[in-house]
Amino acid sequence: MITEEKPAATAGAGAAMMDVQLGAWLLLDHATMHHASAELVTKTAGGDLHRYTYADFARRAQKLMHALDGLGIAAGERVATLGWNTYRHLECYFGVPCSRHVLHTLNLRLSPADLGYVIGHADDRAILVDPDLLPLLEKVGAEALARVEHVIVLGHTVPETSLRGVIAYEDLIADAPDAYPRQEIAETTPLGICYTSGTTGRPKAAVYTHRSTFLHSLAATSAAGLRIGPDDCVLPVVPMFHANAWGIPYAATAVGAKQVFPGPHLDGASLVDLFLSERVTISGG
């Protein structure tokens, strides 16, 4: 009689290959381990170009992780951004979810009423905002911002504002350690929230997990996607508040590609100038 031999159970038979939780930490660590010297370039609000490397970026993102913990924001609570495509926004892309918080990218094209609705619906505890967008946040109103405990201006100083609890980003992270202890985050943990633009009724939320973001990044780097590789220079025109800029910043970080951020300079001449001067190979608008 012939009997079929059953395969040994995985449990107790040895470690499974690649038995790791997929998430933002893997993307961040790969970039800094293998592409530490690759450049990240931002055209600032004043028109100057800010340059630094993935190594610099990783240190600052980890300082932000410590700073958010220091503000008393608990794991799983929402931290919003209201900003243009910049290097500081990229630091938030990793600093927020890698410290077990949930990134909520606010659409700066929404009306103040809809912004107030999504801030309240997500129950944001902090908002990181570019200086020139503070007036928009002020229009949202104190009632809609009642549960927001911290407003962090993405810069060195705080412009005059009627908002409460405001601090400058650079002051917030200045004295924080630049190495954050790795914690295994379950891949099903929410990484971020993005709301629709409210074309039919109120904006509606979609939640990204660490796993979905990691897999989307792999797909974007493939030839079946955007074919982003380590030799590319990527400039996402599509906003970082819109579907995570199609996942381009996460995908580019995953492979250590050079990234160029246009900030608020979205006119044709400014973009073409960046395309040429920085030798951009891939964009998305």
Image (cartoon, grey):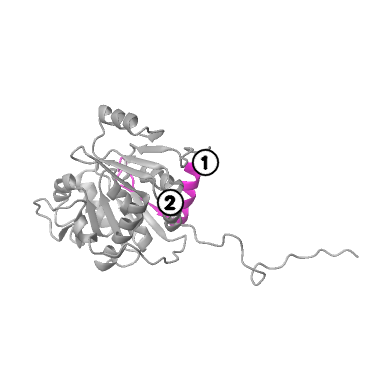
Nearer to us in this view, 146 or 257: 257
- Amino acid at dot 2: Ala
- Res 236 visible: yes
Quadrant of the rendering where the C terminus is positioned: top left
- Amino acid at dot 1: Ser
Numbered disc in front, either 2 or 1: 2
- Res 118 visible: no
Q: Residue furthest right?
A: 1
Nearer to us in this view, 248 or 41: 41
Residues drawn in magenta = 195-221
Helix, strand or loop for disc 1: loop
**Disc 2: which residue:** 31
Helix, strand or loop for disc 2: helix
**Residue at the image position 57 percent from the left and 59 percent from the top:** 18
Left or right for 63, reference 284: left
Q: Residues within 10 Å of mark 2 (few under 14, many from 20)?
A: many
Left or right for 24, reference 242: right
**Residue at the image position 21 percent from the left and 48 percent from the top:** 130
In magenta segment, residue 210:
yes
**Disc 1: which residue:** 222
**Residue at the image position 13 percent from the left and 53 percent from the top:** 158
Q: Residue furthest front?
A: 37
